[in-house]
Amino acid sequence: MRISALAERTDLPVATVKYYLRAGLLHPGTATSRTQATYDESHVERVRLVRALSEVGGLSLATVGRVLEALEEPEVERLGVLGAAQRSLLGPDLVTLPPEAERSAAPASRAREFVRARGWRVDPGDPVLDHLDAAWQACDDAGLGLDEERMDAYADAVEQVAVVDVESVPAEPHAAVRQVVLGTVLVDPVLAALRRLAQQHVSVIRHGAG
Amino acid sequence: MRISALAERTDLPVATVKYYLRAGLLHPGTATSRTQATYDESHVERVRLVRALSEVGGLSLATVGRVLEALEEPEVERLGVLGAAQRSLLGPDLVTLPPEAERSAAPASRAREFVRARGWRVDPGDPVLDHLDAAWQACDDAGLGLDEERMDAYADAVEQVAVVDVESVPAEPHAAVRQVVLGTVLVDPVLAALRRLAQQHVSVIRHGAG
């Protein structure tokens, strides 16, 4: 199909599709003349993925680019898949972990103490812990009363989410990376919507009909 | 304190604090002369809240403004708190629910069928259901295999999150609105970080040491 048909199939202006091509978010079509190219279903799929990651997942186009690169990596050791995929979602200066020596000397923090106390097997140098510290601090600053006990109750529930996540990861490494990366980004909004609906349900059950 | 001290206390440029004042996100200080005003701890707290909602919660400043307005509402019926607070987080064109007649004729959708099958007591006209439909569709488009069975497993876990959420809401209406609005926005990033850490833990437990 021509680029105009690709734009129509994906509900985007032609200019946006051209931008994706220039930014390397979309692979080039097959040239049919010096100025024209033809596109196929793989292009439709890729454009939809870029849109989903940016619009539903809320990622910047730069981060979308990193996520797509992670999907292309030819061989990833099964055990390294999760960490590599998760790190591709963080900023470029966070992608490289500090050397082992510095990691074991990672600063004490409430998030690190929390996962240690829970017995979660997590690298203490993982930048996700810094994200948790910052998000927890923001809740404290807002006076939300998010103490260790409530955090533990959240963690119990989230551990069940993670079991579902991990069980859904296929064995084949390429498919595994895809599932982990996209599942992390695209399922977050599903969980956020479910949380709001479940809050309504629980609220009605506890406090009477709404 | 002067505006420069307020900016220093909150780690922001003076220009940003002035912008918050102009945009009505921050209440005016007490005038000490025709060109100067003095600020107190309530201003420090408010600036930190605006930052947390925009930087940690990822809200636009326009949405931050709507959230802050919801916090100011003097009297909200206890049972209406949750819906009002949740809707303040959605776009302005979504804040007003359609009339009852149209609501009962809300379009059939997978999200509506899903919550009905679960027995969740949710208004079928709630726009959060449309968000869930869109997020679910994005997962389908990406080939994540998020079927009803996996969605049910997620919903079981998220229901526990919601129980913790609802139990943390105080009885006093003003405090309740604050807890619901801020808890919805600021706890989402906490849950997202916990999910990534729990994925690592579950992955290590299932597949051997990482």
Image (cartoon, coloured by chain):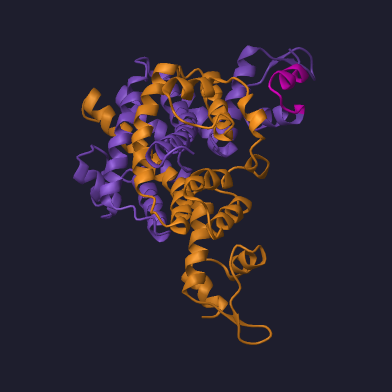
Chain colours: A purple, B orange
Of residue B148 and residue A210, the one placed in the foreground of this image is A210
**Residue B61, quarter of picture:** bottom right
**What secondary structure do most residues of the magenta stretch adopt?**
helix
Residue sitting at 21 percent across and 25 percent down?
B208
Could one spot residue B28 in this view of the protein? Answer: yes
Q: Where is residue A207 in the image (x, y as percent from the top left)?
A: 40, 42
Quarter of the image with the N terminus of chain A is: top right
Q: Where is residue A39 in the image (x, y as percent from the top left)?
A: 69, 14
- In the rendered view, tell whether residue B204 sits above or below residue B48: above
Residue sitting at 23 percent across and 48 percent down?
A104
- In the rendered view, tell whether residue A106 sits above or below residue B145: below
Q: Farthest residue to the bottom: give it.
A: B33
In the picture provided, is B185 more to the left or to the right than A10?
A: left
- In the rendered view, tell whether residue B196 sits above or below residue B75: above
Of residue A56 and residue A95, the one placed in the foreground of this image is A56
Of residue A42 and residue A183, the one placed in the foreground of this image is A183
In the picture provided, is A2 more to the left or to the right than B91?
A: right
Could one spot residue B11 in this view of the protein? Answer: no
Q: Where is residue B52 in the image (x, y as percent from the top left)?
A: 48, 56
Q: Farthest residue to the front: give it.
A: A208
Residue A28 covered by magenta stretch: no
Residue A6 covered by magenta stretch: yes
Residue sitting at 67 percent across and 35 percent down?
B99
**Residue B16, quarter of picture:** bottom right
Number of numbered labels in the structure image: 0
- In the rendered view, tell whether residue B186 sits above or below residue A31: below
> What range of the chain is rendered magenta?
A3-14
**Residue A143, quarter of picture:** bottom left
Of residue A129 and residue B21, the one placed in the foreground of this image is B21
Q: Position of residue A168 (x, y in %)?
A: 37, 19
Residue sitting at 51 percent across and 51 percent down?
B77
